Image (cartoon, rainbow, N blue to C red):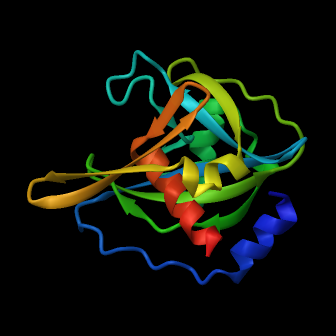
Amino acid sequence: MTREQLLTRLNLLAPAPDPVLPCHARPAAVLLPLLEGEEGLELVLTRRSRHLRHHPGQISFPGGRVDDTDASLWHTALRESQEEIGLDPALCRPLARLRAQHMVSGFALTPFIGLVEGRPHFVPNPDEVDEVFRVPLDYLLDLDHHYLYYLHRRGRRHTVCFIPWQGIWIWGITAAVIHQFAVQVSR
C-alpha cells in the first residue's frame, strides 16, 4: 500500500467513536509509525525488553502512559517513541487516531498512526526495547493473516487476535490494534 492509497482510505473514514471506558482507566498512547519502504509502507514494531516485569519479549508499538508534562495523547505517543526507539518527533506527522481500547491492565490505550519522513535510524533503549523491526503494512492489513480466538473470562467473551510474521507471533493489544486498523481501512 502506498502513502497515497492509505491517505485516501483514512480520509474516507468517519472517525470511530471511542467505546465507553471505565472511569478509573489510566490514559496511555501508542504510535503506529509508518515508513515508506521500497515496496510500500512498512509498520515499525518493537520487541519489549526481556527483563521487563510486564509483557517481557512481546511485540509492541512504542508508547506508554501519559505523563503530567504531556500536552496531549499525541505528545505522549511521540515522547514515548523518542524514549524507546530514538524517533525524532519532528520527523513524524499524524495521519489518524484510532478508537481507544481498554486494556486488562487498566489503561485506556489510544493508538495514533504517524507517517515518519526520511530514513530514520532507530536506536532501541535497552531498558525498554530489545529490537526494532519493520513489517510490510500490506501484510498486516490482510485479514487472512489474522487468527481470531474467542475465550470466556469473568463471564465475558473476549477476542484474542494473533498475527504471525517470520516466526514471530504478534498478539495481545498490539494485534488487536492492528486488527482494528485493518478492519477500518478495508471497508
Q: How many labels sit on residues? A: 0
Q: Position of residue 162 (x, y in %)?
A: 44, 43
Q: Where is residue 99 in the image (x, y as percent from the top left)?
A: 48, 68
Q: Which of 13 and 160 is in front in this view?
A: 160
Q: Say which quarter of the image contains residue 37.
A: top right
Q: Is residue 3 above or below residue 134?
A: below
Q: Is residue 42 above or below residue 74?
A: above
Image quadrant containing the C terminus: bottom right
Which residue is the extreme one toward the front?
A: 144
Evaluate whether residue 67 shows in this view.
no
Q: Where is residue 4 in the image (x, y as percent from the top left)?
A: 86, 66
Image quadrant containing the N terminus: bottom right
Q: Say which quarter of the image contains residue 185.
A: bottom right
Is 134 displayed left or right of 119 in the figure?
Answer: left
Is 112 displayed left or right of 100 in the figure?
Answer: right
Q: In this view, does 80 lie above or below 154?
A: above
Is 46 displayed left or right of 160 in the figure?
Answer: right
Evaluate whether residue 162 shows in this view.
yes
Residue at (70%, 73%) from the top-left corner? 10
Q: Which of 57 and 116 is in front in this view?
A: 57
Residue at (90%, 41%) from the top-left corner? 38
Q: In this view, does 31 lie above or below 187?
A: above
Residue at (56%, 47%) from the top-left corner? 145
